[in-house]
Amino acid sequence: ETAEPVYMGSGAKGSAASGNITLGEPTYATGFTKATDDIWIAAVHSSDQVAHTFTNWTEIVQGNGGGTTSRLSVWYFRYAGSNPNFSVTHTAGQSPIGGIAAFRCVKNTGSPVNVSSAIGAGTDGSIEHTAVTPTVESTKLLVINGAADDNNRTALTGYVGTIFDEAGSLCYKTT
């Protein structure tokens, strides 16, 4: 548990115009396969305020941002030999989209999350994140956001890598 968490791979995006979506199982980097205690992080966004439900997963945070046009939820699953449910329930609303990323060398008991922040409610052209200060050494900071548009993103200054990238847009997109 002293090593820094390592990103292992992501699954295909799940998206729909409305209703439920099915997220793709993470595809691991060449030479690696899923293993007990790997942590899968799922991020789901919709252009509405309709709650997301994800059985077999533990919710980290869920909330509305940007008035009535944006909802984001983040979940984790600890792999223990069998796959979880991949279907996210979204009973109505607009444009749900999401993905799953896998990590290894994560704390192997209890919650893998050291600190999380609330969902912000900005309505301008930028996405702000409230301050997060990890209290455990060798912590990986994940910046997860969503927006009710279909625009490309600009990489964050000082951060390395984009997990969900569709054709160089630095995000998963749906209209």
Image (cartoon, grey):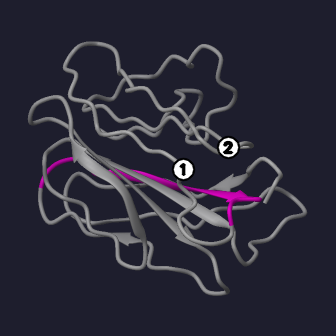
**Where the N terminus falls, by quadrant?**
bottom right
Residue 133: say if magenta.
no
Is residue 38 positioned above or below 48 on the image? below
Q: Is residue 95 visible?
A: no
Report how many numbered discs are placed on residues in the image: 2
Report the amino acid beneath label 2: Thr
- Residue 25, located in which quarter of the rendered image? bottom right
Report the amino acid beneath label 1: Asn
Q: What residue is shown with label 1? A: 114
For mark 2, does the 10 Å Cα neighbourhood hold few (<14), some (14 to 19), or many (20 or more) residues? some
From which residue to which does the magenta span run?
93-107
Q: Is residue 168 visible?
A: yes
Mark 2 or mark 1: whose residue is earlier in sequence: 1
Label 1: which secondary element: loop
Q: What residue is shown with label 2? A: 139
Determine whether, in the image, residue 157 is placed left or right of residue 123: right
For mark 1, does the 10 Å Cα neighbourhood hold few (<14), some (14 to 19), or many (20 or more) residues? some
Identified at 90% across, 63% down, the residue is: 31
Identified at 18% across, 58% down, the residue is: 51
Residue 106: say if magenta.
yes
Is residue 61 positioned above or below 20 on the image? above
Across and down, in percent, residue 83 comes to: 57, 81
Residue furthest out toward the bottom = 82
Residue furthest out toward the front = 135
Query: Do labels 2 and 1 touch, CB within 8 Å?
Result: yes
